[in-house]
Amino acid sequence: MLRPRVRRLFRLPPRRSEDILTELEDELRFHLENRTEELRAQGMSPEDAWNEAVRRFGTLERARRRLATTAQRREGRMRLSLLFDAFTQDTRYVVRQLARSPGFTAAVTATLALGVGANATMFGVLDRLLLRPPAHVVQPERLARLQVTHTTPRGTSSWVTTNFSYADFRNLRDATLGLPVAAYWTTNATLDRGSAAQAVRTQLVSPSFFDLVGPKPQAGRFFVPDDGIEPVGQPVAVIGHGLWMRRFGGARDVIGQQLRIGPTTFTVIGVAPRYFSGLGNVAIDVWIPLTSAAGIRFGDGANWMSARNTWLSIIARVPGDSQAIHAATTKVAGVLEPAISNGERSAPTAHPEFAPVLRRYAARNNPDVKVARLLMAVSVFVLLIACGNVANLLLARAIKRRQEVAVRLALGVSPARLATMMLAESAMLAVLGGLGAVAVVHIGGRMVRARLLSGVTAWSASLVDARVLAFTCVATFVVIVLIAAAPLMQSLRTSVTAALAAGGRTSSGRTAFTRSSLVVAQVTLCTVLLVGTGLFVRSLQNVNDLRLGMDTKQVLAAQMDLSSVGRAKHEIAATFLTLARRVRVMPGVRSASVAMALPLASSWADRLIIPGIPKLPSVPDGGPYFNLVDEHFFSTLGTRILRGRGITAADVATSANVAVVNESMAKLFWPNDDPIGRCIKVGGDTMPCATIVGIVENARRQRLLEGTSVQYFLPLSASVGSEASRVLLIRASGRPDALVERVQRDLQRAGADFPYVDVRPMQTLLDGDFKPWTLGSTMFGVFGGLALVLASIGLYAMLAYDVAQRTRELSVRMALGAQSRDIMRLVMRRGIGLAASGTVFGVLLALGGGRWIKDLLYDVSTTDAAVFAAVVATLLLTAFIATTLPARRATRVDLRTAMTAE
Amino acid sequence: MADDGLPLLRGSLDILVLKTLSWGPMHGYEITKWIEERSGRVFSVDDGALYHAIHRMEERRWISAEWGVTENSRRARYYKLSPAGRAHLRQESERWLRSASALTDVLTAKA
């Protein structure tokens, strides 16, 4: 009973639901009509027949509705399985196609992986450094740090202080500010004694700290107000996750265990959550109450509470309401005012404010933010170059397949279907590229951490996490979609006959222009990046070559907090002198010196009276600062004595009342006279005169780049300053790094009850200051190098493709008598021409855009000729190398194969 | 006349449709007529239930559907038995016949 029917040739396209419903209606109506006819044939009237038919159908309406639902569901399921089949078939096809051209697939995947991966790494790093708030901090956008801006009465200079005394904190805490405050200070303290001594990163906090910041303990509890009751509070400690693992193996019974930190034995009462590191980036090992500061800072006794010692950071949780903040700030000014304006100097006006802790909200011209933005721009450049490569590769491939596409179109494949296939191919490439990018981020992140950010230890192991992954995926897909669109359009607009006739070999003028301009654009961006690299490298060189007034590169600093193990003050001084003598005879040591304060790390100031100058001029940068030094100090540090003499052994032995001033002090206080022989009184008017015996060159006090600093030096045995604070400075005769470990081990063994001996090169004290240029030149260098590699691959690929396209033409030329030299010249001229135009554009762009990085550089003009020359030379050389290979290959074209190939 | 037709046994509609289609592709009305005639007008088919059964079996891929043209040049939806449907038909017929004969034995047993 076969019936003739219409056969479908192609797959059933998905149908819309209206069509399904219409079909159902048609079917039902057909049925009813048949039934009606049958009944009419039996003699009923048309109307009765119809009604009877409907009645026979039984509950037509409800049936109709139910049938509609089932029909749609059925249709949906069938559609899904059809789509799934189509999907698997397409995927298999795409994989086969890509496997057939492994070079292309590898090139695109690698380029995407590098381009997107580099960007994602940059994003991950910046996210951790700047965007992401510190871990486990509740509502970090509400946290603010107290800082006071001082301006001299005439407004000539201003500076910002962020350190306060315990008295300040206590006054603020007890005043009704309307917002909660806490204080903290971070330092390295000693755990255990003698040879087992180790350094632990310790944060001293007020009892309100954990409540204010908001983390929840992993085990045990945090501090309560009683723990911080003056004067000594309770010897309780909260440990960090790292210490918990390292020392206690993560055991649950850590609560109640003892830790000997400094002079005190603390009991562990809780464990902080993993990755919590207060408000900073560096992992904290242990938190103890501020009241335990005695012995860890300022010696024992009540010095730590004194209003004269400013050492604490104060934070507060501020409300969103600006009026409330203003009211609080006014109150703070009132509380702090008496503390600030005491002293001889004409009181500068003090303006307190709450600065947000989160850097994201920090002022726009914050240097960290600027560097971050710059780095992001740099990585985007590299991404653009990578995109250029991928676009070129895709275009080239599209052109090669024009013939194939034309044939298919002629056979009747719908353009939409073809477009789907090509998009599927692009999607597959995107997936491969994305996976590669994730791998790059993982490896790259590790390298970045190890090299540049080793101080930042509060990260989890890998840079790859949800946010970074999301960024990577989005970036990859955007890239692919954007650049796959063009070749796609190109393919589909192909005229069938033209493509078939051309045999898929020639490329239209327009695509050649697109591809050439892509290469030129790549070279342009690359040039700009390399110029940036050059400028940063030169800045770094300049900064490195700065005269600091001391030779930090050759000097080690050895510090040890003997007061924390109960040594009396005079014992401390004597111990250090003994250690100095011990160190001087070690091999590799040229000289050693004992001083009170470690230059670049801490500064001391006291009242200074100069008879003959009733009102001292105000000193910029606070000060004048002084240090107590022995006879070897200036020679160990390498500070030149300009006039007169330095401190001698005799001065130290007899506690002579002498002083040595630095150049700035001489110029500031005695602009028209000779300071040598003058008298200064340190500590008050009743103190004896210290006679100035010499002038030394200016040396940095705290920062790499700072204004003039007014300093003077007294003999080690002078009766001002602190007897308990000592540091040992060691000058190495060879490389200082090799000496560090030896000195550390030797000094650690020198006393059975010694706390941890911290030995480090003095240069490390300045590392933070070097960071912008170190970071800048490294990142620019890496990205610039990457850009160079990518751009040269792009140039090479384009020329190689060109040569392949022009085999016929070239072989004809050779047959007509051209030498291989001429062919090579032909190809290379094109290549170098492209590179040269890119370089020219790049140079112009770099010259114009220099102003954006101007204030990140040091002592380098943005139009530095040497840098530009070097960059141009590098690029042309690279272009030369990149073009030789295709050019060489062009000369080996065989005439016969070229002519007969099709 | 068809009012005093017997209602179909539960679940038997599916197998009746499949058996009907084993004679060749038909459209919905033809299936109804075929069942009515072949059963000697004993069974009357509820058309709504029929189309439900058809849709269900279509979902299960026992039958497939195509629009075709009748002898009178009218458009109708034709149903065809699929290989899976054929296998199911074989299985279910056996089962039905077996349970029907067992039932008959029990009901005709002399007391």
Image (cartoon, rainbow, N blue to C red):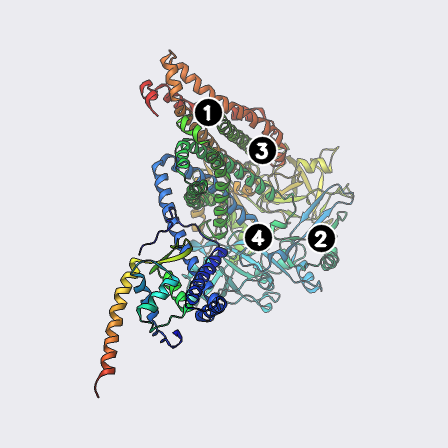
Determine if residue A454 is in view: no
Disc on the earlier residue, 4 or 2:
2
Q: Distance between the residues labelled 4 and 3?
A: 33 Å
**Of helix, strand and loop, which one carries label 1?**
helix
Tell me the number on the disc at residue A724. 4
Gap between marks 2 and 3 measured at Cα: 34 Å
Quarter that holds the N terminus of chain A: bottom left
- Which amino acid does the dot numbered 2 rest on? Pro
Q: Distance between the residues labelled 2 and 1?
A: 58 Å
Instruction: Give percent across and percent down for residue A71.
Output: 44, 61
Q: Mark 4 lies on which chain?
A: A
Q: Which of A265 and A524 is in front in this view?
A: A524
Relative to B94, residue A482 above or below: above
Q: Which amino acid does label 4 sit on?
A: Ala
Side of A344 relative to B57 (left or right): right
Residue named by callout 2: A352
Are tags 2 and 1 found on a single chain?
Answer: yes
Judged by depth in the image, the label closer to the viewer, 4 or 3, is 3
Chain ID of residue with mark 1: A
- Depth check, mark 4 against mark 1: the one in front is 1
| Residue that mark 1 sits on | A879
The three-letter amino acid code for the residue at tag 3 is Leu
Image mark 3: chain: A
Q: Nearer the viewer, mark 2 or mark 1?
A: 1
Quick one: SS at disc 4?
loop
Going from N to C along the chain, the mark reached first, 4 or 1, is 4
Question: Are there few (<14), some (14-19), or many (20+) residues within 10 Å of tag 3?
Answer: few
Could you say where residue A720 lies in the image, as x and y percent from the top left?
64, 49
Which label is found at residue A546? 3
Same chain, marks 4 and 1?
yes
